[in-house]
Image (cartoon, rainbow, N blue to C red):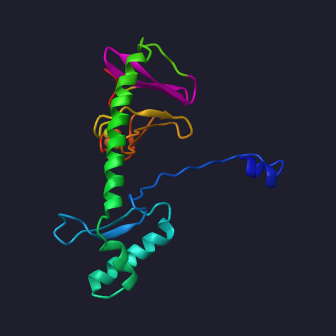
């Protein structure tokens, strides 16, 4: 914003966007045959915000592999082994995920009780407590929704993203619309209404 004001004085912000992206622990994209895919399913992932170029590289390499061609640079990416540093980074990430899960459930003890009539300000959301269950309450476009705040993937507690007006899970990145619909996996199930 500061950069914009400096270089384009007088300009107004009319639109914004944001993005989420996957990255491997060693920051390199990778692609090849999907494990347990019977040799018939290929995957490509971990573009790390470089999807415009890395997706092309992945499709060239995958088609070369299927058609029997050879792209020497592709071997670096999809035949690599996990390095000790990469394995350590993965273990540390998993430890962070476990800690975030434990912390967010512990924080619930201090969340405000859900009185059934909380109406957050337009565009905002909050986590409340009903007995021991976390409840996600938000108001978007004048509609207030009360949902279970427990992520339908592996039980993380979602948090409100006021830029996107979504409920996001800090554990593995699942995202839900304000009415609970899945926007992005790994989960495949919507957030149910609060009980
Ligand atoms: S527990 Fe929410 S994305 Fe995995």
Q: Look at the picture and state if 127 lies above or below 55.
A: above
The residue that appears at 35% across and 41% down in the rendered structure is 97
Outermost residue toward the bottom in this view: 69
Q: Eyeballing the image, is 125 above or below 55?
A: above
Query: In which quadrant is the C terminus drawn?
Result: top left
* Ligand 1 positioned in quadrant: top left
Residue drawn where x is 59% and y is 50% of the image = 17
- Vertical comparison of 78 with 152: above or below: below
Q: Which residues are magenta?
A: 121-146
Left or right, 35 with respect to 141, comes to left
Up-down: is 88 above or below 64?
above
What residue lies at 36% left-to-right and 45% top-to-bottom? 172
120 relative position to 116: left or right:
right
Q: Position of residue 192 (x, y in %)?
A: 32, 30
- In front of the other: 151 or 72: 72
Residue 23 x, y percent position in the rendering: 42, 58
Q: Residue at x 38, y 35 (%)?
A: 100
Inspect this view and state whether residue 153 appears.
yes
Q: Is residue 118 left or right of residue 82?
A: right
The secondary structure making up most of the magenta span is strand
Q: How many marks?
A: 0
Q: Any magenta on residue 138?
A: yes
Please state which of residues 92 and 2 is positioned toward the viewer in this rendering: 92
Instruction: Give the image location of residue 145, x and y in percent.
Output: 44, 26
| Residue 51 on the magenta span | no
Of 10 and 21, the residue lying toward us: 21
């Amino acid at each position: 914003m500061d950069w914009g004001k400096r270089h384009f004085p007088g300009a107004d912000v009319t639109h914004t966007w944001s993005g989420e992206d996957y990255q491997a622990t060693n920051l390199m994209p990778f692609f090849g045959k999907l494990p347990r895919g019977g040799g018939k399913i290929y995957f490509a992932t971990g573009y790390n915000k470089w999807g415009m170029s890395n997706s092309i590289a992945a499709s060239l390499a995958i088609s070369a592999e299927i058609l029997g061609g050879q792209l020497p640079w592709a071997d670096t990416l999809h035949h690599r082994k996990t390095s000790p540093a990469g394995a350590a980074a993965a273990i540390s990430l998993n430890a962070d995920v476990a800690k975030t899960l434990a912390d967010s459930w512990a924080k619930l003890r201090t969340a405000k009780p859900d009185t059934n009539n909380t109406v957050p300000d337009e565009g905002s959301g909050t986590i409340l407590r009903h007995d021991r269950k976390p409840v996600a309450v938000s108001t978007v476009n004048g509609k207030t929704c009360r949902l279970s705040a427990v992520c339908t993937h592996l039980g993380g507690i979602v948090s409100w993203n006021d830029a996107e007006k979504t409920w996001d899970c800090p554990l593995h990145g699942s995202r839900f619309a304000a009415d609970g619909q899945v926007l992005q996996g790994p989960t495949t199930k919507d957030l149910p209404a609060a009980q």
